[in-house]
Amino acid sequence: MGEVGHSQDCQSYYAADDPRLFDFLDTREAIDYTAFEGLTITDIEPVVLPIFNENDPKENYLLYRVANTLHIDTQNSTVTKKLTFQEQQQLNERVIEENERILRNSDYFSGAMIVPHRVCGDQIELLTVVRDVWTLSPSASFSRAGGENTSDVGISESNLLGTGQSLAIGRFSNSDRSGVSASYGNDHLFGNHTELDISYSDNSDGHVKELSLERPFYSLNSSTAAGIYYLHETRIDEITNATETLNSFRTDIEKTEVYYGWSRGLINNTSRRWTVGLTDDTTSYYYIAATQIAPPIDRRLRYPWLSFESIEDQYWTARNVSQIGRQEDIRLGAYWFARAGYASDAWGSNENALIYHIRHQYTLSVGRHHLLQMTGGLNGRYNTDQNRAISNLLTLETRYNHFIDKNNRWHARLRIDVAHNIDQNEQLTSGGDDNLRGYPNDTQRGDQRVLFTVERRHFSDWHIFNLIRVGAATYIDFGRTRDTQTPGATNTVTLANVGAGLRFSSSKASQGRVVHVDIAAPLRNRRTVDRYQLLITGKSTF
């Protein structure tokens, strides 16, 4: 891995101009930090690699060189601000791995790793290596999914002047509404880990104003967190079933939340966090002319709450799971989250209720060929005056990945949702790009839903012009949503479809953007829907 340096007592490993730094996956797998555990870190040098590797003949073209020249590189200080360790501290392998995950979580890096530069006796020098992507993105997109058209035109910059700040403006149109929007984000306000996010949109049916200012639990060893959140949104909600509009009403939401959290940090490989907060959540509904069905009842919930979170420090860095050809950090082991609060009419609420949210996830890796993730969650509230649960949703989901080889996967997903005493606008639906892809959006609607999907995924080595990575999938979906809550609701049948599609992901643009091009054909109720559904959508995963 290394070579002897000029000094007899020093050994050199990687230099800032080492071509191996462009190969994040293989280079990082070759480094074993257990050999350096406890050494004193004397230097941390950021290395920001360009978008295109001009030493690679496949990327040494005039257009690519011009792109490198026009792109403003990430500032060294932006990289350094993300780190949780400093010079003169002793090297800890766990801390190194966590900081690599923090860096990779930034959507303006295509890869990140920390490598040894030089070791002299009991001292070590490190290189913090990141590779930039093209972050200035003029966009003009059109997609069709579930029989509905969506368009989006705008411009965004997720690494403004190399500082890690984001700015975006745009115009959008979908099946529900159209409008213009603007947003700004800063993950390192005041030079530390304080995050600021502001967004505003002026829509055809209302507006959205949103602000978040928080200092989160930035690492597993963070001791405190605090934040404030504000949202004001007005919109028109249309309740549809396939092509039929069942109801329409205006919704006005205003929500404010503040919180403070504390933790003893990472103890026995687990980080446990407690948080207290106060929430004021008001939702009002208004009739729209010609509406025949009453909208839901207005609701105001003002309540203090307490939450607990537990995270195990187990991660697996893999490739070709939900992204194409990129490092992916998969959290293993157990994750718990529970939050409970009590709303009282004495504090301005319009009901006395216990409000709760519980989530558990367990992820297990068996060898290098099997990945199983099981998730369960319950949220809603319990009205203590009426002694009944309201707006309750129980979700159980299992995802399984079988790794055939480095390019081929089997993926299966089973999801069960059960709702109780929900409003019409809270109903579960099936059909469209997220489930039952052979049917239009909202083909079925109700309070109980079962979905099952099996996919054969292929992550190809095809890298078009060293810009676009390509994948493919064939699949079969089964599912049913039924309404047991509405008197006289029509009973539904289990639907199924088969389909195939291509996946496209840019290796030189922000991560987490995968374009899906699918064609899916229904296997049941074929006389009531189109013979096939063509879906072109943008998603965050494969």
Image (cartoon, rainbow, N blue to C red):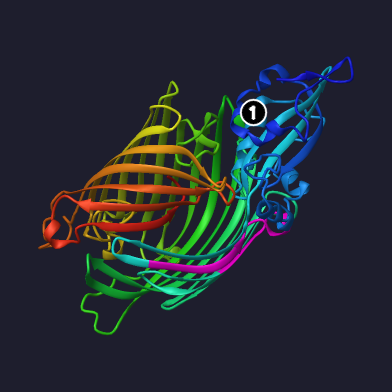
| SS label for mark 1 | helix
Q: Which residue is mark 1?
A: 27
Which x, y percent locates residue 112? 64, 38
* 242 versus 68 height, above or below: below
The reply to whether residue 437 is in sight is no
For the stretch drawn in magenta, the main secondary structure is: strand
State left or right for residue 347 relative to residue 11: left
At a point 18% along the width and 56% down the height, the residue shown is 483
* Of the pair 202 and 178, the residue shown nearer to us: 178
Which x, y percent locates residue 110? 60, 44
Using the rendered view, name the quadrant where residue 431 is placed: bottom left
**526 drawn magenta:** no
State left or right for residue 413 relative to residue 44: left
Q: Which residues are magenta?
A: 150-169
Q: Residue furthest top?
A: 8
Identify the amino acid type marked 1. Answer: Thr
